[in-house]
Image: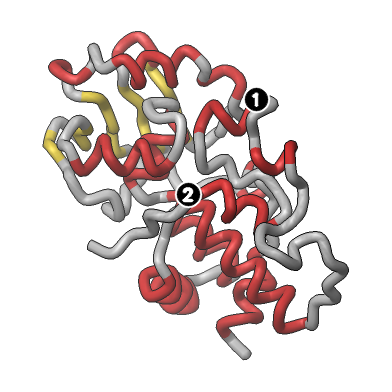
């Protein structure tokens, strides 16, 4: 499976904001965006005027990097969203938010989506009592997600759960912290998806050009 293995802090700097790709480090003074708030590279501190196309491209790249999805798969989410009722942008965000690795991260079992993806791939996560090792698995309303009993002693799972209060509380997820489990109640509420801020309409305009 193809995946990005380069320095993730450069991705945040390129988009000019924290994408929270490194878990707890993003909340500290060590965050690269706080230390060097300009794009990476030789001309990073130069003045660059973006065209309309570039603005849409950057927004698409930002959303794709937030959720850790490669281009072909992200494009497929867009096409799937166009076939659904409702606003295409919101449906697209609903699909990526319904991914198992994203829900594992949102519930607080992992400090980043990369960490959540590793938990899923290593079969530490159960969905409705069954092992699922596919990070892109799309959850349905009412699905129960939990950490395997044998895996609950993993230190970074406990460390992530201990910091879960600093994250935004989301109405479409229900966490049972004591039992290392949670319930995916349904599609996300768009108004609650503001960290980091996303302008999904620009992504729709990029793909529909």
Residue 80, visible in the rendered structure = no
> Neighbour class for label 1 at 10 Å: few (<14), some, many (≥20)?
few
Q: Number of marks in the image?
A: 2
Residue at image coords 47%, 12%: 162
Whether residue 68 sits left or right of residue 36 in the image: it is: left
Q: Nearer the viewer, residue 24 or 113?
A: 24
Q: In the image, which disc is placed on residue 58?
A: none
Q: In the image, which disc is placed on residue 28?
A: 1
Residue at image coords 67%, 70%: 201
Instruction: Tell me the quarter of the image containing the N terminus.
Output: bottom left
Q: Is label 2 or label 1 in front?
A: 1
Whether residue 19 sits left or right of residue 7 in the image: it is: right
Residue at image coords 56%, 33%: 170
Give SS at disc 1: loop
> Neighbour class for label 2 at 10 Å: few (<14), some, many (≥20)?
some
Pick whichever of labels 2 and 1 is earlier in the sequence.
1
Q: Can you identify the residue that label 2 sits on? A: 187
Q: Position of residue 151 (x, y in %)?
A: 19, 20
Q: Position of residue 157 (x, y in %)?
A: 34, 20
**Looking at the image, is 54 positioned above or below residue 173?**
below
Whether residue 150 sits left or right of residue 198 in the image: it is: left
């Amino acid at each position: 499976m193809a995946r990005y293995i380069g320095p993730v802090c450069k991705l945040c700097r390129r988009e000019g904001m924290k994408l929270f790709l490194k878990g707890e480090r993003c909340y500290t003074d060590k965050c690269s965006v706080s230390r060097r708030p300009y794009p990476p590279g030789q001309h990073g501190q130069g003045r660059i005027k973006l065209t309309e196309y570039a603005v849409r491209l950057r927004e698409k790249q930002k959303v794709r990097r937030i959720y850790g999805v490669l281009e072909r798969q992200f494009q497929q989410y867009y096409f799937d969203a166009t076939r659904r009722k409702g606003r295409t942008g919101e449906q697209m965000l609903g699909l990526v938010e319904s991914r198992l690795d994203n829900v594992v991260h949102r519930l607080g079992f992992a400090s980043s989506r990369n960490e959540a993806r590793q938990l899923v791939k290593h079969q530490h996560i159960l969905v409705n009592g069954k092992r699922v090792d596919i990070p892109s698995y799309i959850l349905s309303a009412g699905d129960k997600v939990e950490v395997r009993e044998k895996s609950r002693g993993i230190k970074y799972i406990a460390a992530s759960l201990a910091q879960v209060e600093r994250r935004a509380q989301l109405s479409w997820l229900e966490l049972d912290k004591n039992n290392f489990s949670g319930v995916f109640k349904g599609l996300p509420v768009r108004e609650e998806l503001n960290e980091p801020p996303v302008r999904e309409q620009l992504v729709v305009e990029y793909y529909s050009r």
